[in-house]
Image (cartoon, helix red, strand yellow):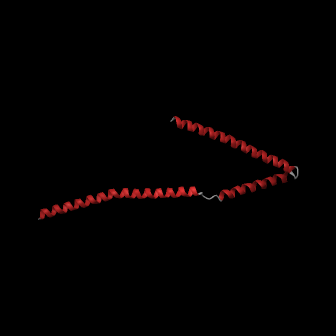
Amino acid sequence: MLRIRALLTRQVRRAVLGLVAVLFLLGVLVLAEVAGWQALRLYVAPIAATLILLGVDLLIAAAFGVLALRSAPSHAEQETLRIRRQALEAAGAALSITAAVPIAGMALRLGRNRERSWLSAFRRSG
């Protein structure tokens, strides 16, 4: 329990530090946008600078979107999916065999009971 508590404490600390890093990274991106806009404004009108930055941001977002859409499952993902399917099939087969055993036992018991009743009826008549 103590090890789990220490592990959770460390993971929470890592998550908080990562969140702070992401917040600062967002701040850097915002300031880079502002600096780019101010640099563009020296050469073009403010509205044109805004539209240029908007177009550049849209192109960057589209490029990352295309990369995200084209991301195919890795070999490791495909392999783990194959192993999972095999395990589920094996479990299903084992379950069907396990379910068949009691049914076969019941059928054998019924057959024995019928055989005994037939033999006892034959002996009585004979």
Q: Quadrant of residue 65?
A: bottom right
Residue 43 is left or right of residue 92, and the answer is right
Residue at the (12%, 62%) spot, across then down: 124
Residue 81 is left or right of residue 101, and the answer is right
Residue at the (81%, 54%) spot, across then down: 52
Q: Quadrant of residue 7?
A: top right
The image position of residue 35, as x and y in percent, is 81, 46
Q: How many marks?
A: 0
Residue at the (86%, 50%) spot, across then down: 41
The image position of residue 68, as x and y in percent, is 66, 56
Residue 100 is left or right of residue 58, and the answer is left
Residue 38 is left or right of residue 26, and the answer is right
Q: Quick check: 9 above or below 35?
A: above
The image position of residue 11, as x and y in percent, is 59, 40
The image position of residue 42, as x and y in percent, is 88, 49
Q: Residue furthest left?
A: 126
Of residue 79 and residue 81, the one placed in the foreground of this image is 79
Residue at the (78%, 47%) spot, across then down: 32
Where's the C terminus, which quadrant? bottom left
